[in-house]
Amino acid sequence: MDSRWLEAHGIYRQLAHSYLQAGWLERPLQGLYRRPFIRGGNNSAEREWQIPVLSAQWIMGFKFHVAATTAMELHGYTHYLRMSGPRKLYLQGDAPRWLSKLDLNVDVTVRQGSLFQDMDVGVDNKEFSLKDNGRELQQSPWQWPMRMSSPERALLETIDEAPNHESFHQIDMLFQFMANVRPKLMTQLLTLCRSVKTKRLFFVFADRHPHAWRKYIDEKAIDLGSGDRMLVKDGRLHPRYRITVPAEFVSKGEHDGA
């Protein structure tokens, strides 16, 4: 909790200081407090990101959600994501700045500008169990839901990170296993999406992996903008969606039309 929350509950600076001296609270950052962790052994709970995120969402009332590939992991797509390098925690909305300053086991990336015209469409409060390798994390007795993107919204948020932060290969892998997309929700999200790049790339990959839901999404009903879009250097211009992608993502027999 932060000092604002403590003061709202009658714990002002002097009393908070007394709690710190007594060991009832500890201060990981200026103006930020938490109950002490039980240290020792191989306990890594102190650096887990879930507890501070849940606290910011439900105790302190910050309006943000877990997004992109982080949400995909929480929905069970971990095996289809590239896990090399540091883990990423994508957050979208009004996340507190102190989250990126904590010593966590993830790299925190906050996207404050919304990719969609509506911040709530496709965002769910998902039941989330705070576990680490099958055991409950210490000092986490809650069974609170995690505010996160649905798989449909998280997929579009992941596409929006390409090519600088997420690779085409990872997105391609995700699409292979997205057999249960809800076409009504995806159509709604595509209609609300502000990024022409993201919408065009969605259809590039959706056509590469023709799941049953694809026929229920009409790209003609989606505003895909006008003109050609260059996204990657030395790529090929997709003949239908007019955006440059790595050559391997343009099917054989298709011509770039440049």
Image (cartoon, rainbow, N blue to C red):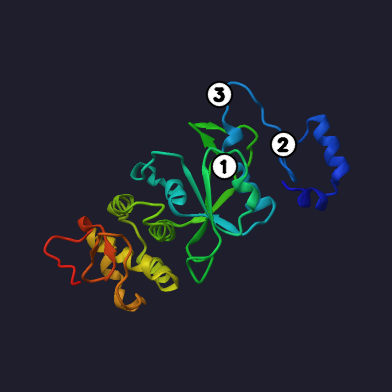
N-terminal-most mark, 1 or 2: 2
Q: Residue furthest top?
A: 41
Q: Position of residue 116 (x, y in %)?
A: 48, 68
Circles 1 and 2 in contact, beta carbons < 8 Å: no
> What residue is at 65 percent from the left and 34 percent from the top?
139
- Classify residue 21 as left or right of residue 157: right
Residue occupying image coordinates x 67% and y 56%: 61
Dot 3: element:
loop
- Residue type, label 2: Arg
Q: CA distance from mark 3 to mark 2?
A: 19 Å
Q: Which mark is residue 42?
A: 3
The answer to which of marks 3 and 2 sits earlier in the sequence is 2
Neighbor class of circle 2 (other Cα within 10 Å; few <14, some 14-19, many 20+) is: some
Q: Which mark is residue 49?
A: 1
**Label 1 Cα neighbours within 10 Å, binned few <14 / some 14-19 / many ≥20:** some
Q: Is residue 242 above or below residue 179?
A: below
Q: Residues within 10 Å of mark 3 (few under 14, many from 20)?
A: few
Q: Amino acid at mark 1?
A: Trp
Residue 39 picture location, percent across and down: 65, 25
Q: Disc 1 and disc 2: Cα gap in Å?
A: 15 Å
Mark 2: which secondary structure? loop
Question: Residue 229, located in which quarter of the rendered image?
Answer: bottom left
According to the picture, the residue beneath numbered tag 2 turns out to be 35
Residue occupying the point 25% across, 68% down: 215
